[in-house]
Amino acid sequence: MRTLIPVDDNDVLAAIRGFLKSLLETGAVDLLLVPVETQTGAVNPMLVADPDQLDAADPLAPVMGINAARAVSRVTIREPQDRDTRPRIGVVLRPCELRALIELVKLKQASLDDLVTIGLDCAGTYDVPDYAAKTQKRKTPKTKARLWRDLYDKLAADPAASNAALRDACQMCEKPHVEGADITLELFGADLSAGIPVTLPDEMAEKLGLRPAKKKGPRAGFVKKLVAQRKRVRDARFGEMRQRLEEEGIEGVFAACVRCHNCMTVCPICYCKTCLFQSALYDREPMQYANWARSKGASRLLADTMLFHLTRLNHMALSCVGCGMCTSGCPADLPVGLVFRAIGQQVQEAFDYSPGHDTEEPLPLVTFQEDEWMEVGTG
Amino acid sequence: MTDDFEPKIVAFLCNWCTYTGADLAGTSRIQYPPNVRIIRLMCSGAVDSTYVLKPLLDGVDGVLIGGCHPGDCHYQSGNYKARRRVVALKEILKSAGFDEERVWLRWISASEGGRFAETVTEMTEALKKKGPNPMRREWAV
């Protein structure tokens, strides 16, 4: 059902908080995973049981410290014997977090069984330090709320406008609109002063006492324009990066890598409890490094930096949803996400695979057809 | 390239087909270039991308993956999955600025000793034409 949540005094955040509260209070969900502002002003996902705690919930805050799909993974893999007692959890996610969650479900690292996914159209996010700097100047909740509203209004006025202050991934995000959530807060293209358009399952709407909205909004048209613009930005950046890769090689683009493995740590798709690059697999006897130095004339230390990136590309590029956490987490300011997306898109196209789209679509590397790529293997 | 360049090939061969085929080439006294270093695995589907990448980045000139013919996998579908992984790997190598033609996947059965010898000969010749892997001198990897 498509309904309209009333907004008083143009306070969208208050209306969303009220809606989330009603979900908890009516028992539509038992718990809510939602970004909450802490006393220090940082915004991070929290699992909320007490509706009163939602007074500090801020799913609109334009900041993304972690991809919350990782948090969902933590709360949904449970023992089968819990089946009768385990809670129903509502998870409030950005579109890129929802896509990452779909991939994690396919990788058997999360389960949708007891989840109610709640998606919000995303106007873009700032890096954590940028967000902190911006909020430091805006102490009151009202002025803080302007941070999101300014982004939203700017986008509403002109979907073709670009914003260089946003995270790199957000500037070229071609899927900022929610697809496939149980509950969708359709913020794009809406007249928010009149109310927030929400689609949700009929039985839940009934439980919450919501009535169907009359007419369809202009969201689809707005999304079309926005996606077209973002694809232009994305393709231009992919083009530039592909040229760089051709000229410099990946070892040139990642020359300044300090091999901290942050990109892997923050990646929602990199789920391995122990990555083989954190294991002793590639540790060598000291003499081995000396031998490499002799045979090549010199040898980079820490060793195996490109091996790390190329292996990670092979392990996760097909599932890369473009959230850009890797770029945000890189201390050397490398365009990790752009490289992975530019390469990932080509591999995804080769397998005709769209990550984060559908849990029924099998992961390309766990499925096969007997009569495909016949030339590979015969030469 | 100078004529005395001898390429190094690392081969990951499946226990049931290609490794046994290589063994047959040996017991049948079939001559083939000594440029190949063989690593036996239980299945071509057990070849992770990192096994191929590590030797390539260290300067090995070519990597050969040998598995059972489609339909013959001892574990039903390991070779089909290997093929998909190789397709992805080659796509990534190409996009990242490497020569993906240094990676070969070939189906060679336990009875095809001759085919194994031919494959190694063919690959050695192709790599000689290409010249040494530039990674052999590239230290910043």
Image: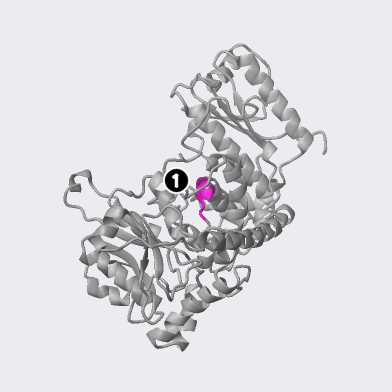
Residue B103 drawn above or below residue A160: above
User: What colour scheme has been applied to the protein in the rendered image?
Assistant: one colour
Residue at 69% across, 49% down: B97
Out of B131 and A35, give the one closest to the viewer: A35
Residue at the image position 55 percent from the left and 63 percent from the top: A222
Three-letter amino acid code at the position of disc 1: Asp
Identify the residue at the far front of this view: A214
The answer to whether residue A159 is above or below residue A103 is below
Crowding near pointer 1: few (<14 within 10 Å), some, many (20+)?
A: some
Q: Say which quarter of the image contains residue A116.
A: bottom left
Examine the structure image and report whether residue B2 is included in the region drawn in magenta.
no
Left of A11 or right of it: where is A80? left
The majority secondary structure of the magenta stretch comes to helix
The residue at the point 47 percent across, 34 percent down is A367
Q: How many marks do you count on the picture? A: 1
Tell me residue B133's x, y (percent): 71, 42
- Viewport quadrant of the N terminus of chain B: top right
Mark 1 falls on what kind of element? loop
The residue to which callout 1 is attached is A358
Instruction: Report the magenta residues as a range.
Output: A315-321
